[in-house]
Image: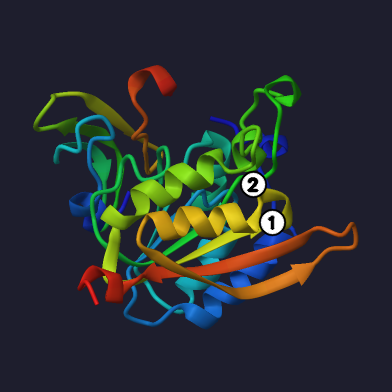
Amino acid sequence: MDIDTSQIYFPAEDTYLLIKAARTEVKQEDRVLEIGTGSGAVAKSVAEITPAVLAVEINPHAAQYAREVNGIEVIRGDLFDPVCGEFDLILFNAPYLPTDPAERFDDWLEYALDGGPSGRDVVERFLREAPSRLATFGRILLLISSLTGMNEILKLCHAQGFIALVTAEERQEDGETLYVLRISRDLCSLCGT
Amino acid sequence: MKRRILDIICCPVCKGKFMLTEMEGNDTEIMEGLLTCTACKRVYPISSGIANLLPEDQR
């Protein structure tokens, strides 16, 4: 298949913020999973620190680019569907833009951007499925935007038994703020104290 | 697809484990082949080193 680069989300401000947070967070022995790796820029940067990085990507153009250009171990799939292992660090630059169905382009790039009408459709599914793939002391770094609704995201985290903290943020020129949430299990709630 | 990830991937439909049919590969990687779910028998291709683990109607 020829790679159509117009169908790939290339690194932008959100990517760089997640890279910065991920490089601070990752440890050498971490088993890392990146959901929706796109061009593979985040996974590549993390792979300089730990060798055990697996990426999932739904878009065939991006998956091929991530493998051939950035040397990422990538499988094609939808979020956690094709993964059964347990991971110490899960990374996700979520599609977080609120998008009306009428605004959809219906191409591969849409998967990188479209968060449904609320902007939270994919994040919600991600948070629901993440607990089964996260090691007991594992961490998630989730990139979202002020457009996605921080309070609602924090509620979703709480509903899954997670604690979430903002570990990086950056205000954009247009007034939008990008956030990286560091999410881990609320271990106190697990033992009922 | 690196050989070492075979035990951390699964059938996206039923979460079953895979049986590998290898057509082309080297010591560490499988370039061309098939992954067959040992539970539901669905088959997923590995092409140019990338396993396509989307259900057939989403590929």
Q: Distance between the residues labelled 2 and 1?
A: 7 Å
**Residue shown at the point (18%, 53%) measured from the top left:** B7
- In x, y percent, where is residue A188? 29, 76
Which of the two residues, A132 or B22, is positioned nearer the viewer here?
A: A132
Q: Residue at x 69, y 43 (%)?
A: A97
- Kind of residue at badge 1: Ser
In this rendering, the answer to whether A9 lies above or below B57 is below
Q: What colour-coding does the image apply?
A: rainbow
| Residue most extreme to the top | B57
**Which numbered disc, 2 or 1, marks the residue that appears first in the sequence?**
2
> Which residue type carries mark 2?
Tyr
Density class for disc 2 (Cα within 10 Å; few <14, some 14-19, many ≥20) is many
Q: In this view, does A100 lie to the left or right of A159?
A: right
Q: In this view, does B55 lie to the left or right of A36?
A: left
Q: In this view, does A171 lie to the left or right of A66?
A: right
Local SS, label 2:
loop
Residue A106 has which mark? none
Q: Which chain carries label 1?
A: A
Q: Identify the image quadrant of residue B2.
A: bottom left
Examine the rendering and report whether any part of residue A56 can be seen.
no
Q: Do the residues labelled 2 and 1 touch (CB within 8 Å)?
A: yes
- Residue at far left of view: B38
Residue A136 position, x and y percent, is 25, 70
Label 1 belongs to which residue?
A: A145
In the rendered image of this protein, does residue A85 appear above or below residue A170?
above
> Which residue bears the numbered disc 2?
A96
Image position of A165 with respect to A134: above or below:
below
Along the line of sight, the residue nearer the viewer: A163 or A130: A163
